[in-house]
Image (cartoon, rainbow, N blue to C red):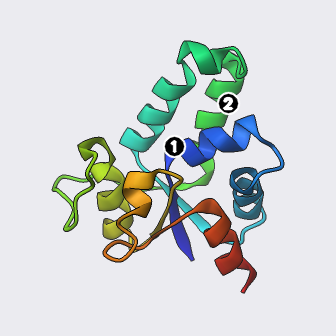
Amino acid sequence: MRAVLDPNVIISALLSPEGSPARLLRAWQQGEFELIVSPILLGELATALAYPKLRKRITCEEARRLVEWLAAGAVTAGDPGEQPPIQSPDPDDDYLIAVAHGERALLVSGDKHLLGLAGDVPVVSPAEFLVLLER
């Protein structure tokens, strides 16, 4: 199974080590699914990790190591050159749909805009993805 994790899922994994997002990262480490990233996804993650409210809980070094770990271990797809077939109400999320679509991967997100597209886009919450992995 292949999956694109929304940067909000990755950040949630850092903030709550026992939650579903953290369990997903551990499942990826154990080879239970193939993680897909792209340069724009890693850039968005690095930018978000530098926000002052997150910097209080995640050091610069931790943020740098996380981005490097994902870049080294995940499959890196190219950034999308086109709009996805279905677009999000939040245009900033369209690249996630496009990467997942282009890589034939499931999109895993906690974002309500993206989860609201579940009938049209293969998108699930972290908890739903864990259930899929357990099957």
Viewer-nearest of labels 1 and 2? 1
**For residue 10, which quarter of the picture?**
top right
Q: Is residue 79 visible?
A: no
Query: In this rendering, would 26 be left or right of 68?
Result: right
Find the distance from the CA under tag 1 to the CA under tag 2: 15 Å
List the residue tagged with mark 1.
7
- Tag 2, which secondary structure? helix
User: How far across and how far down the image is residue 12, in percent?
Assistant: 66, 42
Amino acid found under the numbered disc labelled 2:
Arg
Vertical placement of residue 119 versus 111, above or below: below
User: How far across and how far down the image is residue 23, in percent?
Assistant: 77, 57
* Mark nearer the N terminus (1 vs 2): 1
List the residue tagged with mark 2.
65
Vertical placement of residue 116 versus 65, above or below: below
Q: Residue at x 54, y 42 (%)?
A: 8
Looking at this view, is 61 or 132 the one in front?
A: 132
Quarter containing the N terminus: bottom right
Q: Residue furthest right?
A: 18
Q: Residue furthest bottom?
A: 135
Q: Residues within 10 Å of mark 2 (few under 14, many from 20)?
A: few
Query: In this rendering, would 94 be left or right of 43?
Result: left
Disc sitting over residue 92 in the figure: none
- Tag 1, which secondary structure? helix
Query: In this rendering, would 120 be left or right of 32?
Result: left
